[in-house]
Amino acid sequence: MTRLEDSDQAPRARGGHAPVLLDAALAALRPAPGGRYLDCTFGGGGHARALLVASAPSGQVVALDADPDATHRAVAIARELDATDRLTFINANFGELAGLRERHEWPLFDGILFDLGLSSFQLDAAERGFAFRLEGPLDMRFDPKHGPSTADLVNSLSEQELTDLIRRFGEEPHARRISRAIVAAREQRPVTQTTELAEIVSQATGGRRGRRIHPATRTFQALRIAVNQELIVLARGVDAAIDALADGGRIGVISFHSLEDRIVKRAFAAAAATCVCPPEQPICTCDTVPKLRLIGRPIQPDVAEQERNPRSRSAILRVAERINIAGALERQRPNVEEHA
């Protein structure tokens, strides 16, 4: 855990990061003085900054990020807002949330936010290997010190394994053609650079030819998801976040593609279910007590935000609220007097 008032690592520049669906996220979480909030994906710090401002002067914000570079930005924001005693940053993946809660003995939170998109800092850093438009090493790890890199996967997986990965995580219709081209290229020499892989994919799929998105987009997404085990971590993190909410607390998740959104939708639906009996069973006997109630419809950026921040185009925000479990149980309990 980083004590922000003791660190001298950070530049004070805010950079060009634009938080997605900021107003909608704040409206959903309803931050207020005295509240406790958790930003599971600190990134560029835009959402955490807004939570600190909206909950001043006494609100507390805990922020997580697997990327160690985010520490510097957290320090800068805490100093800028004179909030070193209100912002706690931890360099950790939100998949570890259950263990972090136990280790740090955190009280329940009034609001929890996930923004699953990459930060502009990550995309604009060529050495991190997230962007095919920049020459850099094929890495893509959120934490560069742990686990295999994208280059390791690209140069070690079989053609079939690459096909399955690109098809599953990238929903790429040309997965077979792309994996075959990667294997052919690496037989000449290892594929180690972002632009090199992007060119292999582009040639394998016939080039851009008027497409709205670059032909390597889905392949890079698939490899990034696989390297960071994003879908497994997301499912674990959202479940832990639901259990970390105080009664009436809200959770908001901003996702950027259908694979992420599907996991969030299913997790919310499962936590909001009032019955888990088999469909063919005529009478409910499970006595399931819901943890959540869904809030409104999924929210997407309006045209103005999409024009202002093109990276927001595919964003979708889902919101749910923690139900008072004791009250729900009381409502489920039969009234003995009514049935006497």
Image: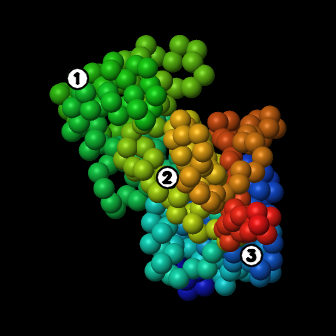
In this rendered view, identify the residue nearer to me: 258 or 69.
Answer: 258
In this rendered view, identify the residue nearer to me: 108 or 189.
Answer: 108
In this rendered view, identify the residue nearer to me: 201 or 163.
Answer: 163
Q: Secondary structure at mark 3?
A: loop
First in sequence, mark 2 or 3: give its number: 3
First in sequence, mark 2 or 1: give its number: 1
Residue at x 51% of width, y 18% of height: 208
Residue type marked 2? Leu
Q: Is residue 121 above or below residue 221?
A: below
Q: Position of residue 161 (x, y in %)?
A: 26, 32
First in sequence, mark 3 or 1: give its number: 3
- Look at discs 2 and 1 and give the one toward the viewer: 2
Residue type marked 1? Ala
Q: Is residue 314 above or below residue 68?
A: above
Q: Which mark is residue 184?
A: 1
Q: Position of residue 190 (x, y in %)?
A: 22, 36
Mark 2 vs mark 3, CA separation in Å: 25 Å
List the residue tagged with mark 3. Answer: 35
List the residue tagged with mark 2. Answer: 234
In this rendered view, identify the residue nearer to me: 168 or 217.
Answer: 168
